[in-house]
Amino acid sequence: MSQRTLVLLKPDAVQRGLIGEILGRIERKAGWTISALEMRTLDRSLLEQHYAEHVGREFYEPLVAFMSAGPVVSMIVEGERVIEGVRALAGPTDPIAAPSGSIRGDFGTITRENLIHASDSEESAEREIKIFFPGIS
């Protein structure tokens, strides 16, 4: 079943020059396509919508500060089981636990700045795509 997911390359991925490497890994997956792509610095309003479920948690403010500190690449990726697949490609949040061959396993340094975001379900993907790409239905 074909799906869509939101993928964000976070400020640390952009700053470290990993955009091409990560995009290449996504593009090389057979059957996946990048249907929308944009680079921009995110404002607090957008981040408050995106991270609404985390308000009040100890990591919320540092996360919003990190995500607004520099440009982010946002994209919609489409394909078979793409939600599950991109999350596997990203690897676990903790770069030490992330396997070699995953984005976080190969390039991650600390848990908070973990290079990439990928929607965790069809519901999240739909909600997040509307936040980052409101003109795309």
Image (cartoon, grey):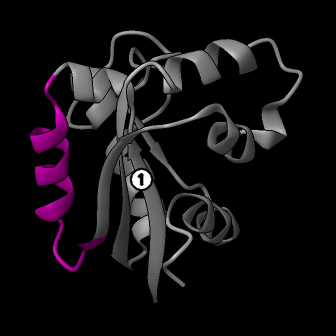
Q: Taking 41 as reference, is 104 left or right? A: left
Pinpoint residue 89: horizontal percent, then vertical percent. Answer: 32, 48
User: Which residue is at the front of the view, 67 or 81?
Assistant: 67
From the image, which quarter does the C terminus lie in?
bottom right
In x, y percent, where is residue 66? 51, 17
Residue drawn at 40 percent across, 69 percent down:
82
Q: Residue at x 27, y 35 (%)?
A: 103
Q: Quadrant of residue 16?
A: top left
| Residue displayed at 35% across by 68% down | 77
Q: Which residues are magenta?
A: 17-35
Position above or below: 70 against 36: above
Q: Is residue 105 visible?
A: no
In the rendered view, does 10 fall on the left or right side of 16? right
Residue at the outermost right position: 56
Q: Pointer 1: what residue?
A: 7
Looking at this view, is 74 or 58 the one in front?
74
Q: Is residue 8 left or right of residue 39?
A: right
Residue 76: percent from left, percent from top: 39, 66
* Residue 27 magenta: yes
**In this orientation, does residue 75 appear?**
yes
Give the number of marks.
1
Q: Residue furthest bottom?
A: 1
